Image (cartoon, rainbow, N blue to C red):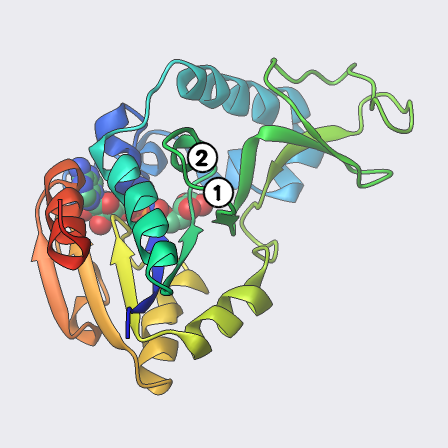
Amino acid sequence: MPPNIVVLTGAGISAESGLGTFRDRQGEGIWAKFDPMKLATLEAFARDPELVLAFYDLRRRNLLGAEPNAAHFALAQLKGALAERGGRLTLVTRNIDDLHERAGSKRVIHMHGELLKARCSACEAVRPWRDDLGVSDVCPHCGRVGTLRPQVVWFGETPLELDVIDWALRQADLFVAIGTSGAVYPAAGFVAEACAYGLRTCEINLEAADNAQLFDEQRLGAASKTIPNWVEELVGP
Ligand code: APR
């Protein structure tokens, strides 16, 4: 029987595309340079919306200049190959970038939202958004001014689609965490949930994550090499 796999990806899969990670052992991640409490909370946005929007404008511009790497393409190939054989890949990401989609993956679960979308805090409408976002922008849906924010999940907010992820874990045989530090919950708890449901678990990462001891198997290395190798082992070249 072809496997039913849940993959969780984090910032590490996009690192070789030039998008920074948040925490690393060298202390060079995004949150070592910028204070998340001033940039990634609802309170920060209420206090200084220009500062918060400027931070996400910078990240959006970086993203528009970035390209998916071999790891994103390999996961898209895996999704297609499993589907052809009657298996399934549920692709969950903590990343707000669109590199999985640009590599060809469809129906990606963005549990922390999407940088290339904006949401109106007044009417809740979510729209594609590729430009800078300003405090005087008008919501295209309800016409209010200054209510738009990036469609991203900030610290203190609830991640998206947790019920769908739990359902997918209950059906799966294998849980694989790729390029994620295991530092922020609830995603850091998926491996424990997977163990409780009887799945095999595998970590593929540059350095062992904080919760590495919970995984059955570990593969260390850069995602652009480890992921294509792993996919080839599963479904062939
Ligand atoms: N290949 C594979 N893994 C890599 C690579 C690479 N080339 N480069 C770095 N990594 C690994 C690091 O070893 C680390 O374990 O990616 C992980 C990145 O960890 P974080 O920066 O903490 O990113 P992530 O786990 O996605 O962060 C989770 O925290 O601040 C929030 O909302 C933010 O979604 C984010 C969440």
Question: Residue at position x 16%, y 36% from top?
Answer: 224
| Residue at the disc numbered 2 | 101
Where residue 161 appears, as percent x and y from the top left, is: 59, 59
225 on left or right of 85: left
Give the image quarter of residue 234.
bottom left
The tag earlier along the polypeptide, 1 or 2, is 2
- Residues marked 1 and 2 touching at CB (< 8 Å): yes
Q: Amino acid at mark 2?
A: Glu
Q: Quadrant of the N terminus?
A: bottom left
Does residue 199 sit above or below 116 in this rendering? below
Residue 28 visible in rendering? no
147 on left or right of 178: right
Q: Quadrant of the C terminus?
A: top left
Q: Quadrant of ligand 1?
A: top left
Work out whether residue 34 or residue 205 is closer to the camera in this orientation and state it. Answer: 205
Q: Amino acid at mark 1?
A: Lys
Does residue 230 sit above or below 36 in this rendering? below
Question: Residue at position x 38%, y 65% from top?
Answer: 86
Work out whether residue 180 or residue 157 is closer to the camera in this orientation and state it. Answer: 180
| Residue at the disc numbered 1 | 106
Does residue 15 sit above or below 165 in this rendering? above
Where residue 101 appears, as percent x and y from the top left, is: 45, 35
Crowd class of label 1 (few under 14; some 14 to 19; many from 20; radius 10 Å): some
Residue 143 visible in rendering? yes
Where residue 195 appears, as percent x and y from the top left, is: 30, 81
Question: Residue at position x 31%, y 85% from top?
Answer: 198
Secondary-structure class at tag 2: helix
Where residue 194 appears, as percent x and y from the top left, is: 35, 77
Question: Residue at position x 21%, y 29% from top?
Answer: 16
